[in-house]
Amino acid sequence: MKTELTPLFQLNLLIHLSLPYPNGSNFYPYFNRQGYTLKFIEKSIPLEPVSIKKLSEVIGKKKAVTPEVILYKDNEKEYLLIECKVRNFDVDWSHHGTRQAAGYLSLTPNHLKDFFRLESESKINAKIVYGVTQQKQQKMSHTLQSISETVKEKLGHALNYEIFGIEIKSDSLYLTVSEGKKVSSYKVINEITLLDSSLIYIVPVDINGQLEKENEDILQTQIRNSLRSMIGRNIGSNPFSFNSTNICEKVNPVWEQLPTPFKQKMKRWVHIYTKEVIEQIARLGINITVQEQNYMFGSVEEKKVDSVRRYLLSEGFLETGQHIFENYEQMSMDDFLDVI
């Protein structure tokens, strides 16, 4: 198994762990089974001015923290801020990870309540949760304990924290979690699914990164599957249309939780590739109008409908525009969860 615990992989892992997959699927959504839902992806949280001032000698100029995901459990009014670390870190105040941890630990439930714009009389619980490789779980515990003590010394308080381990074994990926005094291991993704990038990478591109070759291939596959479904089902005697946002929503079941700048970037990439695919379909004699990021299909006679559907299932369609990004059917949530 060649899966690597890169930051992008870990972000996607956290998303899968929070989706409402049915029993018997290829994913075991640990956090969802614990009652949490996905609230935000990569949402920056500003630190309190008083905390910035009191911690300035240890955190430097850090003014915000950005957890990979924020989960919420309604019945306990609890927020989890989750941060995965590919590389472990020690208590070294020159290290980004140490200063970042102090920033997280400086947060208070009241500050988070204001940030999430909750009612003033409401009460919430919150904690920072770190995910690390399983063998470094104990070391991270000691590191966070030390950082927490420093934060308490300077602020008089520190946010609660937890740690879970991630381990890739010969058969699957496992999560190791502490449940009271008990340590439990959960098989969360099987080996076959780990090797299917188009399923794993709900977010195929680093939120703040560029479209690399491997990411490009994944995104193209996802767009083709989406277009195959949307065009194949709708083409016929009645005109129809869709836009780049519709495609993005089918490609990505957590589209609404993604940061706005990233969504704008994704829509541009999707539009570039969709135009290439549509140009190929138009050559079959189909009337298609592209206006900005909207795609309008005219009525099509039955004979040509069959031609288009055959093309959508062909090897030629699978090879469309393989290098379109060099210079620059995923589905609805319900459909997505049904087939995984």
Image (cartoon, rainbow, N blue to C red):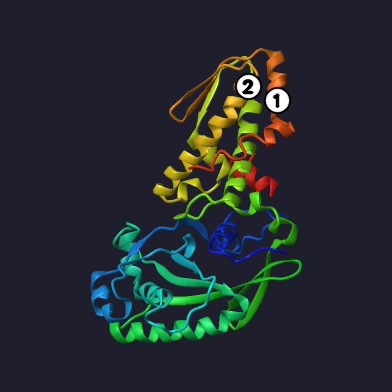
Q: Residue at x 63, y 79 (%)?
A: 183
**Which residue is nearer to you in this view: 162 or 93?**
93
Say whether residue 157 is left or right of residue 27: left
Q: Earlier in the sequence, mark 2 or mark 1?
A: 2
Q: Are marks 2 and 1 in contact (CB under 8 Å)?
A: yes
Q: Residue 156: horizontal and vertical position, in percent?
A: 30, 83
Q: Residue at x 53, y 30 (%)?
A: 275
Residue that label 2 marks: 235
What is the C-alpha distance between the residues marked 2 and 1?
A: 9 Å
Amino acid type indicated by mark 2: Ile
- 278 or 119: nearer the eye? 278
Question: Which label sits on residue 309?
Answer: 1
Query: Could you tell me residue 26's position as x and y percent?
Result: 71, 56
**In this view of the protein, can residue 331 be seen by the observer?**
no
Question: Is any part of residue 280 visible from this angle?
Answer: yes
In the rendering, at what x and y percent does residue 104 appear? Answer: 39, 72
